[in-house]
Amino acid sequence: PVHTQPARCLETLTAFVEKWHDLVHAAEEEVAARAHRDRKKAEDADDEVELYDDFMTRIMATGHSCQDVIELLEGAKPLPKHVLQGLPRNAARYRIDENMLRRWEILTDKYQDDLDRLENNSRDL
């Protein structure tokens, strides 16, 4: 066909090169996007390390250890009285009512024990 129909061969080769160009261009864009994502992850990791270092510096400046902060956040150690003095007293703040408990059960799917779930083999016939 190269000798008998050169125009058709040229057309076929042109179509092949155009499609190949599109594939190569898409692959180059993907490589560039991946490199950008990798750079962004590295920058984010650096930012996180910087934030953590800043957080630890601020904790150590207060005279507390990391373990002290963990125990305070987990409630294993009570807050000192001087921290709580002067705070406004709001009876509804940090209280769990029935609506909040129900919302938590639904969102976390922790109410399953209260449901009567029927399995496929326990249907009434």
Image (tube, helix red, strand yellow):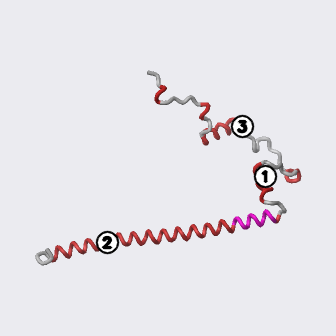
Instruction: Report the magenta stretch's main SS.
Output: helix
- Judge left or right: residue 36 versus residue 64: left
Q: Kindly identify which residue carries mark 3.
A: 97
Kind of residue at disc 2: Trp
Give the magenta range: 51-60
In three-dimensional space, the C-alpha distance between marks 3 and 2, rounded to whole angstroms, equals 64 Å
Q: Is residue 105 above or below residue 70?
A: above
- Dot 2 or dot 1: first in sequence order is 2
- Which residue occupies 82% across, 60% down? 64
- Which residue occupies 46% across, 72% down? 32
- Dot 3 or dot 2: first in sequence order is 2
Q: Residue furthest left?
A: 4
98 or 68: which is nearer to us?
68
Q: Kindly identify which residue carries mark 2.
A: 20
Kind of residue at disc 1: Glu
| Number of the label disc, if any, that sits on residue 71 | 1
